[in-house]
Amino acid sequence: MRVSWKRQSDNLVILLLALALWQGLYAYAGDVAITPPWQTLRYTAHLLGDRSFWPNVQATMLAFLYALVISAIGGVGLGLLLGLRRFAGDVAEPVIASLYTIPKVTLYPVMLLLFGLGLSAKVAFGVIHGMIPVILFTLAAVKNIPPVLLRTARALHLTPMQTATTVLAPAVIPEIVTGMRVGFALTLLGVLIGEMFASQRGLGFLIINGINQHNVPMTTSVTLLVVVFAVAANGLMLALTRRVHRAGQTMH
């Protein structure tokens, strides 16, 4: 009970500090850059009640879902493949890590040429942001499996399926879930960037359109909705990650 109350009080303090910082930024920059918290909340309520707003939400969520599934399946698959092939993993890991540092916005002309405007471009932007961390976390998880576990599996004459389910999975799943949490946030970021540069619908499009039209309430309100969604989803993913790590430690 005390832990729950302390956690709630900490969250309340963080929220109040965020609101104070927000109000301070408004006092410093003024209406040309940001709207104050209360005005933003009123405009956000207006947006949520506007039927024309929800197709943009649907467009973003659809692209995000596609990109997240591709990032998860592709990232875990490639990470496992490279991790199980030690030499290939050692060669590929620094190359993939180097690609991760490239500003993805610089690939905008290539993405636009390959995919054009629309859903496919947004999904591609999301995938190139979100897949690489999943690959790297999965690869590291497989490479860091203690050799004694595999030797024990061979000594017990376990089948490959038994080895995968009873030895490999408990060892790598916690790190894979951590990589998924990082990939989740970056995939969302990639989709929003894709909507800013290669789409005419979606929350990212509304943000960049609000900037171009100097519609500060629109830009601030949509940004607030994105931040709230990202924070809530990250909190759920973090709770899942902690639970999986605790389960993994218990099994070991």
Image (tube, grey):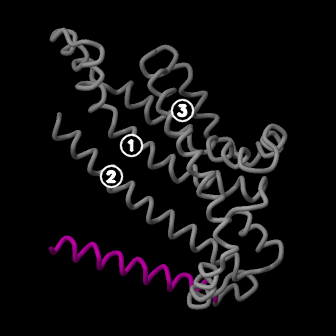
Q: Is residue 14 left or right of residue 191?
A: left
Few, some or many C-alpha atoms within 10 Å of disc 2 (few <14, some 14-19, many ≥20)?
some
Q: Earlier in the sequence, mark 2 or mark 3?
A: 3
Label 2 belongs to which residue?
240
All told, the count of numbered labels is 3
How many residues crowd around disc 3 within 10 Å: few (fewer than 14), some, or many (20 or more)? some
Disc 1 crowd, CA 10 A, few/some/many (<14, 14-19, 20+): many
Q: Which residue is at 22% across, 72% downward?
A: 4
- Closer to the chain start, of discs 1 and 2, is 1
- Which amino acid type is shown beneath numbered disc 3? Gly
Q: Is residue 248 above or below residue 207?
A: above
Q: Is residue 229 above or below residue 48?
A: above
CA separation in Å, label 1 and label 2: 8 Å
Q: Which residue is mark 3?
A: 74
As shown in the figure, which amino acid type bears the numbered disc 1?
A: Val
Q: Residue at x 70, y 88 (%)?
A: 30
- The quarter of the picture where residue 193 lies is bottom right
Q: Where residue 61 sits in the image (x, y, percent)?
A: 59, 57
Magenta residue span: 1-26
Label 3 vs 1, first from the N-terminus: 3
* Residue type, label 2: Leu
Is 24 a magenta residue? yes
List the residue tagged with mark 1: 177
Q: Are marks 1 and 2 in contact (CB under 8 Å)?
A: yes
Residue drawn at the location 68% of the way across and 65% of the way down: 56
